[in-house]
Image (spheres, rainbow, N blue to C red):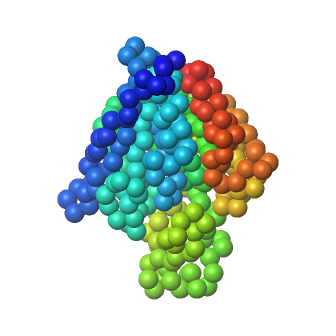
Amino acid sequence: MTDPSAATPPQEKSVTVGGAGDERTIAILYRPPSAGTSAPVLVWLGGYRSDMTGTKAAEMDAFAARQGLGAIRFDYSGHGASGGDFRQGTISRWLEETIAVLDHLKPERIVLVGSSMGGWIALRLAQELRQRATGPHLAGLVLIAPAPDFTSELIEPHLTDAQRRALAEQGHFEELSEYSPEPNIFTRDLLEDGRRNQVLTGIIETGCPVHILQGMQDADVPYRHALKLVEFLPAEDVVVTLIRDGDHRLSRPQDIDRMLAAVGSLVNHD
């Protein structure tokens, strides 16, 4: 373990993704591992409209600094410090950016820490990595209030007539957000692309241990959704921690402790 007081700030990096007319610059915060360590690098995958400076992401980076681990944080296009138009965002687009970040930094082994929508992207990334002959070895997944297939499972079944009309006529609808003064925006492209990226359709082979943390008072992603995900991970070493009084954020000190314990267990497991 390194001395926390000696930790240096992470390096600011960026990578450009997309061809002509669709280029966006993805902002990255990268903490190199300590010299000589063979431990996996931690990779933060944030949620819808969150950014890499949020509480859980920053705590993951601080944990990496204390342990001498490498850590990667970045903002999807249209989020935080990255370029691009949020309304053009889709799961495919944000997955492409995730892969581009990993290809740019070239970690050999990784533990993915995915929050909410980031849990969906983590699962899709696991599928993509298994199909590739190159790229990092996936050593573990920590999924915090994971929201795989949230567009088709949690949004579309509950659309109002007014929201359906807005999608048809305007290409998007808005709803109030509990986490921001700005409304959430859900586009027709996001919903249609979500159907193409569904993972709750068959066995999900990650090839690594999975630890799920889920609040039972989560109003955005019901805890039963996490239990449904487990049904599609029958071949994996899966641990589920249900937090009776936990909400969707899971950002309280005790929740952070659980997250870091899960991360540490997978780092040491590998």
- Image point (52%, 62%), residue name: 195
- Image point (41%, 57%), residue name: 79
Residue 239 % position (x, y): 71, 35
- Image point (25%, 57%), residue name: 23
Among all residues in the image, which is located at the extreme right?
244
Among all residues in the image, which is located at the extreme front?
5
Q: Is residue 12 visible?
A: yes
Left or right, 44 with respect to 30, comes to right
From what the image shows, is residue 81 above or below residue 9?
A: below
Among all residues in the image, which is located at the extreme left?
20
Q: Is residue 135 visible?
A: no
The quadrant where residue 231 appears: top right
- Image point (65%, 71%), residue name: 157
Q: Nearer the viewer, residue 231 or 113?
A: 113
Left or right, 245 with respect to 155, comes to right
Q: Nearer the viewer, residue 191 or 28?
A: 28
The quadrant where residue 170 appears: bottom left
Residue 105 % position (x, y): 33, 34
Residue 263 % position (x, y): 59, 31
Image quarter (top left, top right, bottom left or bottom right) of the C terminus: top right
